[in-house]
Image (cartoon, helix red, strand yellow):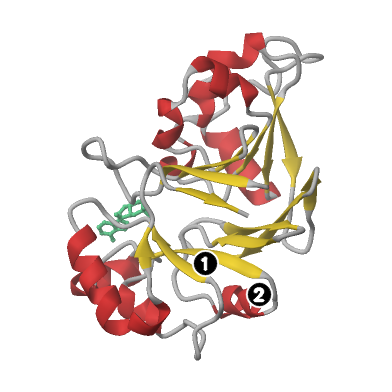
Amino acid sequence: MMKLTVLGCSGGIGGDAHRTTALLVDDDVLIDAGTGVADLDIDALARIDHVFITHAHIDHIACLPLMVDAVGARRAMPLVVHCTRATEAILRTHLFNDVLWPDFTRVPAQAKPFLRFEPLEEGESCALGERIFTPLPAKHGVPAVGFRVATPRGSLVFGSDTTVCPPFWDAVARIPDLRYLIVETAFPDSQRKLAIQSEHLCPSLLASQLPSPPGAFRLLISHVKPGYVDETLQDLQRVAESHAPAILAKGDIYWI
Ligand SMILES: Nc1ncnc2c1ncn2[C@@H]1O[C@@H]2COP(=O)(O)O[C@H]2[C@H]1O
């Protein structure tokens, strides 16, 4: 069985309930490395061998530089960061640039660095044992992808941050064994304008894209902005009731 542990899935910080995006797959893989990663102890951090990054926004990568520094010296192998070349370029230019943070693709030694990038583009897949990670289309303010995680028992999709994106929904429709669909709804409908400006979704925009009739998967909502959880849930229940949406929460565990 594959275990998915939600370390963080909020659209921001503020109190113990809210950590930004980080999904732990079993105990060795992360999807995104937001502030939820900071709750793992040193041993748990050292067990993580792979991080799949959806996009370079700070709420999705905040703990990546910190975790590399925290456990790099304890690990036998570099941490492998899987992302598109576009996201790698952003992370190299703006983060691992020996200014904001050391370039751990060359530190502590070029021959034995703490981190290495592995390109993963749309149309490609990365198999780690029986778990197959495949980028999916997304549309956000910077280059972004979602991920499908396929196992022999079914698939999970994490849509990342995205606004209206028909290619994402076309890809979802082609996944016959979809068990869990995690999609964002960052803002309530009262902030629809901001959702559009910042290339996110609100409940009415999400509802306009959901399949009809509802698919045989569990619909889980991520990235809700702290302070707007109740309002967003009420909107979702009004516009997407037949899909029985549930708001994802830190600490949730799903098995496939
Ligand atoms: N035009 C905007 N006006 C106000 N806030 C914004 C705007 N664009 C982006 N943001 C905020 O900046 C945040 C960056 O991270 P997110 O994409 O999660 O969510 C975004 C919004 O909360």
Q: Residue 170: x and y, percent?
A: 63, 80
* Residue wearing tag 1: 139
Residue 98 visible, this orientation? no
Relative to 31, say whether 241 is above or below: below
Q: Quadrant of residue 194?
A: bottom left
Q: In which quarter of the image is residue 237?
A: bottom left
At a point 64% along the width and 42% down the height, the residue shown is 89
Q: Residue 138: x and y, percent?
A: 56, 65
- Verify CB contact (< 8 Å) between mark 2 and mark 1: no
Q: Point out the frontmost of discs 2 and 1.
A: 2
Name the quadrant of the C terminus: bottom right
43 or 97: nearer the viewer: 43
At a point 64% along the width and 20% down the height, the residue shown is 104
Q: Residues within 10 Å of mark 2 (few under 14, many from 20)?
A: few
Instruction: Report how far apart the C-alphas of labels 2 and 1 lie in the structure.
Output: 14 Å
Question: Which residue in the rendered view is the most extreme toward the bottom?
Answer: 213
Secondary structure under tag 2 reads helix
At a point 52% along the width and 35% down the height, the residue shown is 94
